[in-house]
Image (cartoon, rainbow, N blue to C red):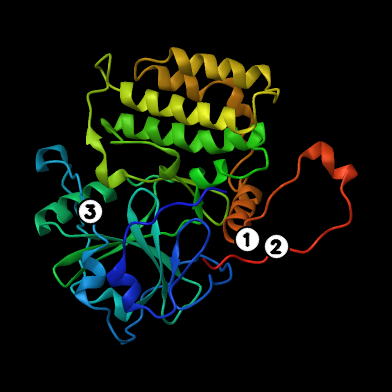
């Protein structure tokens, strides 16, 4: 498991006692990583607690690339932006960097309710347009935006939580099965197909943008930075297909050069390599490789393995060596560095 370098978060760490990092670089506030809990969502309470300083939020901001107003369909029921401190309702638990900085927080009363908080220092008009676009582009493979807060000249987007990303799954020393590959890619392609129908595409797509939920489902991050595109243009999805080929190659390489893949996945790889236009997306979605997709939740085992490996630095022995392994040795202790 490779360690990741965390963006300096001095003000956040100083605001929370006993900050510790797990092996991926996530900073956990107040001690060790909490036990895995349900991610069901409950309505916010009116609890009032101490609020972190403004410096806490100012370091965890990232740019927002919202479309101009003419690209948006008017929303008949615009979402309310709550002018109050989110820290009265949510307790910051960890700061995570996966290509952008987000704070993992839990509801102060309903401890099982988790959210990921994205902080933005932009104009209100930009947030309003962005939120309108996110609501208009609701899709099962796009994270749900739960709430929007305005506090201390910052806007905070409350997203449904995720457990880990494809980046962590690719760092596992165990192999990814062909069925798991299909389960990972299917929601990605369906999401891109939906966005194409809305004349939009993601600004970028990397393994860190493919999120896994606790239930073993896949979500695609970055909808807030999506951009307008003309699907009729021959080069409309060039950058997206390049990103897909890069991700697919990383997955194929993960199992090693001696691993034998089926004819179906090899055929899919060839079709993806030849894809150049937006129309190719429909043919890829209909490929026989995706007949392995059995429904939602098929990645739960992979998510559990990624979580345990990230935190405990578990290593997997080669499959052909298990029968020759001596009695189990000393168990691996959790890392707190």
Vertical arrangement, residue 273 with respect to residue 77, above or below: above
Tell me residue 200's x, y (percent). Answer: 27, 33
Q: Position of residue 23 (x, y in %)?
A: 53, 58
Circle count: 3
- Rate crowding at label 1 as few (under 14), some (14 to 19) or many (20 or more) other CA atoms within 10 Å: some
Q: CA–CA distance between discs 2 and 1?
A: 7 Å
Q: Regarding mark 3 in the picture, which secondary structure is present there?
A: helix
Q: In the image, residue 301 lies at what x, y percent?
A: 66, 50
Q: Which residue is mark 2?
A: 332
Q: Nearer the viewer, residue 316 or 62?
A: 316
Q: CA distance from mark 3 to mark 1?
A: 38 Å
> Which type of secondary structure does the marked residue at label 2 adopt?
loop
* Circle number at residue 121: none
Q: Please identify the quarter of the rendering in which residue 144 is found.
A: bottom left
Residue 53 as seen in the image, left or right of residue 107: left
Alpha carbon separation for disc pair 2 and 3: 44 Å
Which one is in front, 321 or 139?
A: 321
Q: Is residue 141 visible?
A: no
Residue at x-position 26% and y-position 30%: 199
Residue at 22 percent across and 53 percent down: it is 131
Q: Mark 2–mark 1 contact, CB under 8 Å? A: yes
Earlier sequence position, callout 2 versus callout 1 = 1
Sequence-wise first label, 3 or 1: 3
Q: Residues within 10 Å of mark 2 (few under 14, many from 20)?
A: few
Question: Which residue corresponds to mark 1?
Answer: 312
- In the rendered structure, find residue 131 and report the number of the disc placed on it: 3
Tell which of 253 and 280 is nearer to you.
253
Query: Which callout, 2 or 3, points at the residue further toward the start of the chain?
Result: 3
């Amino acid at each position: 498991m490779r360690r990741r370098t965390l963006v300096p978060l001095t003000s956040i760490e100083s605001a929370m006692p006993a900050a510790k990092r797990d092996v991926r670089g996530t900073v956990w506030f107040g001690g060790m990583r909490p036990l895995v809990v349900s991610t069901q969502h409950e309505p916010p309470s009116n609890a009032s607690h101490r609020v972190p300083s403004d410096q806490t939020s100012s370091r965890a901001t990232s740019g927002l690339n919202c479309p101009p107003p003419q690209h948006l369909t008017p929303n008949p029921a615009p979402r309310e932006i709550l002018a109050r401190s989110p820290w009265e309702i949510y307790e910051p638990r960890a700061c995570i960097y996966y290509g952008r900085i987000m704070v993992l927080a839990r509801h102060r009363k309903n401890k099982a309710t988790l959210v990921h908080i994205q902080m933005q220092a932009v104009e209100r008009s930009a947030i309003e347009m962005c939120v309108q676009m996110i609501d208009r582009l609701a899709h099962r493979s796009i994270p749900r935006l739960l709430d929007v807060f305005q506090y201390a000249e910052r806007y905070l987007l409350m997203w449904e939580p995720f457990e880990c990303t494809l980046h962590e799954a690719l760092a596992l020393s165990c192999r990814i099965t062909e069925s798991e590959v299909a389960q990972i890619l299917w929601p990605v392609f369906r999401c891109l197909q939906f966005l194409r129908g809305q004349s939009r595409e993601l600004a970028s797509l990397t393994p860190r943008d493919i999120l896994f939920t606790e239930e073993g489902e896949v979500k695609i991050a970055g909808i807030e930075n999506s951009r307008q595109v003309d699907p009729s243009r021959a080069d409309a999805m060039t950058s997206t297909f390049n990103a897909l080929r890069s991700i697919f190659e990383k997955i194929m390489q993960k199992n090693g050069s001696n691993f034998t893949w089926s004819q179906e996945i090899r055929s899919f790889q060839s079709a993806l390599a030849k894809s150049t236009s937006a129309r190719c997306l429909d043919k890829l979605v209909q490929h026989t490789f995706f007949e392995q997709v059995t429904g939602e939740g098929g990645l739960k085992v992979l998510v559990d393995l990624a979580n345990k490996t990230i935190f405990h630095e578990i290593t997997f022995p080669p499959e052909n060596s298990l029968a020759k392994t001596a009695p189990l040795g000393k168990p691996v202790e959790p890392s707190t560095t």
